[in-house]
Amino acid sequence: MHFIDILIFIIYFAVMLGVGFYFFKKNQNIEDYYIGGRSLGSWHIGLSVVATDVGGGFSIGLGGLGFTIGLAGSWMLFTGLIGAWLSGVVLIPIVSKLSVKHRFFTFPQIFEHFYNSKVALIAGIISAIGYIGFTSSQLLAGAKLASATFVEIDFLTVLIIMGVIAVVYTGIGGMKAVIYTDTIQWIILMSGLIFIGIPISYQAIGGFDAIKACLKPELLSLRNIHWQQLVNWGITIIPIWFVGMTLYQRIYASKSESQAKKAWFIAGLFEWPLMAFMGVTLGLFSRVAFENGMFTEIGYSVSTGIDPEMGLPILLNKVLPVGLMGLMLSAYFSAVLSTADSCLMAASGNLQTDILGKIFKFKQDRKSQLLTSQIITLSVGTLALLLASYMTNVLELMLYSYAFMVSGLFIPILIALYGKKPNSLAAILSMVIGGTTTVALIVSNLELPFKLDANIFGITASAFVYYSVTFLLNKTSR
């Protein structure tokens, strides 16, 4: 990699760290640290939401889908559009009012309000585990991208560098640092894709004639997908909009209910069609380059094969000239960090407020609380970095983490917000059984009916347990 590219890359990271240090001095308490003082507008929130949801994991993962199944891979983010708009209409009005009235700043506090502290503790544990997995997946995405670019540096070294930078600026700066860097990062990513990545890659592979000659027609069709895959994406991704700690933090951080709704509408449009088609299109370009032997000299050929998620970063490394490579690499690292920082903040908030805070019942002044938050965030980030060093597939790790959270929390939160007389015992059992069912099915590697995702069975088990326990308790009390 040329010195100019490295310099651009260093400047980018210096700016991100600078934002973190700036807000380090601005934060006065944990409300500032975790939800930005409830003072942020719709565009900052909206760009932060989409940057978090369509970050490095989905950016690299979308490239892998484009490489494997073509344009039909874009349907994955269509579920994000549905989730954003649906939750904007039915979730935000309820949660925003609760936030204003009770000054919430974590997701499990909703459970404590409708159920009890034990339910909130379990929800906090499930959410923290899920978001540590999210953070790990993003660091892994960044390491994959960097290892394909900085060929002189081994994968583990790149992972450590990525992790340290992400953890430091997030840990010291808090939510405002996260949201403002997300805005910067998303602008960098979109500009890089639109003005650099797509046009240069398109020309380098030979344009549409080369695409048409190289690829099978189904890769250019939106129908190159089985219904099971659509169901699996939908049942995993749409519910996350109702159980994601990162999303609740942004509802709480919004100036008003109307600002939050507008932010969710903005996020949905950016997810699909804009980001969805750009991501899979670049993945298709990398497939053309691979099929035409452009990666042969660096050891990847049709006979040896290639990790589909590596196709895109290798293509960019191959075709981008000096200077533009540094800008484009910064754009993709923006995507990685914009999700990693948000997930890290979510896990930290869960751990401090919903787990350790309930077990040890901290009584600290504002400065001590803020220092504790920063220490916890740095510790969680270190744990996520260690987890990432043992994983290999970005999209798989992220979707498994999603599945774990959704299976345990989706049914209880729906009952809490929209049901009548929520039952705490039923909620606890449904959380445990739902999450355990999904994890057990994933670990056992069983072939499930119709090739459906384990998450579907976890949610079904969670609902069955909740309503069975409620029915039995009601029957016994008569």
Image (cartoon, grey):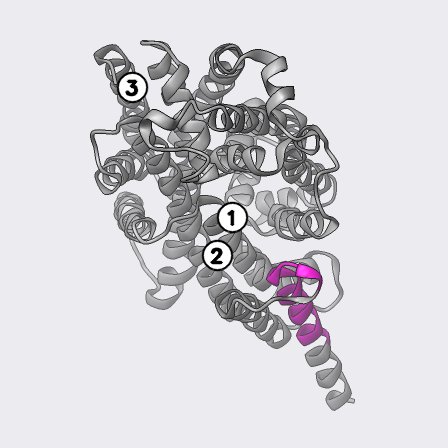
Tags 2 and 3 touching, CB below 8 Å: no
Residue 9: give its label: 3
Q: Position of residue 442 (x, y in %)?
A: 52, 64
Q: Residue at x 33, y 9 (%)?
A: 323
Q: Position of residue 227 (x, y in %)?
A: 74, 49
Q: In the image, is residue 408 above or below residue 477?
A: above
Which residue is identified by label 1? 245
Q: Which residues are magenta?
A: 450-467
Q: Nearer the viewer, residue 115 or 227?
A: 227
Total residue callouts: 3
Q: Secondary structure at mark 1?
A: helix
Residue 462 on the magenta span: yes
- Note whether residue 289 is visible: yes
Q: Amino acid at mark 3?
A: Phe
Q: Nearer the viewer, residue 150 or 266?
A: 150
Q: Amino acid at mark 1?
A: Met
Which residue is identified by label 2? 127
Among numbered discs 3 and 1, the one appearing first in the sequence: 3
Q: Nearer the viewer, residue 275 or 343?
A: 275
Tags 2 and 1 touching, CB below 8 Å: yes
Q: Secondary structure at mark 3?
A: helix
Q: Residue at x 42, y 41 (%)?
A: 34
Among numbered discs 2 and 3, the one appearing first in the sequence: 3
Residue 462: give its label: none
